Image (cartoon, rainbow, N blue to C red):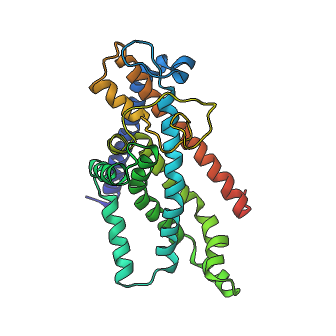
Amino acid sequence: MSPKTADRIATVVFSVIATFFVVLLLGLLGYIFYRGLPVIDWHFLTSPPKTMEAGGGVGIQLFNTVYVLVLSLLITVPLGVGGGIYLAEFARRGPFTELVRLAVEVLASLPSIVVGLFGFLVFVYYTGWKFTLLGGALALTIFNLPLIVRVTEDALRAVPRDQREASLALGVTRWHTVVHVLLPSAVPGILTGIILASGRAFGEAAALMFTAGMTTLPLDFSNWDLFSPSSPLSPMRPGEVLSVHIWKLNAESLVPDRLRISDGASALLVLVVLLYNVFARWLGRAFYRRLTASE
């Protein structure tokens, strides 16, 4: 076989594989939106769920999903970016650095149910917190921390070496080089990691069932007391998220229109993830242009 023929065959094979993934994604999204979009309206988005009657919504579950994601990112991003900076710029070859890398790899390979049971044991039982949104956010942190550490390290290593050496040659300290030269250039890569981590947080169910719980209390959106169980901003209250609600509707719910609500909640969850991706990428590009003064 001539090299040109082999090149053409490889081009066709990889094009078919790429097309397959696009068709698979469009087919999946089309089916979910076809079943779920007609269900979504203002009443569905804002009303609380019902336990025995038809006509309930997912307003509280939607709020809990976004809130537990925010709590998780507040914990994960500083720790993950800090760990990535350490491994890329400050770590020296040795047993300790290898131990850190091994810990990151082990955390990345943990099954979801194992993290959920670990979270139940630590954040629910030993701490005495019971089911809380904070416990759910900490469980998500265990999932997402290795991803953000790896992405941050790779993004920093991908910055051209000339920029790092030019900054150090001017007498700038390593820390200022990281903050003012490397991190602005690595923003798109770090943002990609945060988006991937957020997508997993939106869809995670097993770990949140054992930490954030499968129930939700009536919320008073005029109550801003962080320690009140009826306050929407309280991290110490139980909170059922959308993915857990979808599972419960299909597994054990007695609501007559559970399939309709499940279809609507699934389409809403996918829609929120897509909108979040678009917003995060727009925000990342804006930060990148501002920090690097590029067009």
Q: Position of residue 289 (x, y in %)?
A: 70, 57
Q: Quadrant of residue 278?
A: top right
Is residue 273 visible in the rendered image? The answer is no
Quarter of the image with the N terminus in it? bottom left
Q: Nearer the viewer, residue 205 or 295?
A: 205
Q: Position of residue 163 (x, y in %)?
A: 63, 76
Is residue 71 toward the left or the right of residue 115 in the image? right
Q: Residue at x 39, y 22 (%)?
A: 263
Q: Is residue 38 left or right of residue 260?
A: right
As displayed, is residue 15 above or below residue 25? Answer: below
Residue 276 lies, with reference to residue 105, above or below; the image says: above
Relative to the observer, which residue lies in front, 173 or 136?
136
For the C terminus, the quadrant is bottom right
The answer to whether residue 255 is above or below residue 63 is: above
Residue 234: % across, % down: 53, 42
- The residue located at (49%, 55%) in the rendering is 193
Answer with left or right where residue 260 lies relative to residue 84. Answer: left
* Residue at left offset 71%, top offset 86%: 170
- Closer to us: 79 or 274: 79
**Image point 35% across, 57% down: which residue?**
4
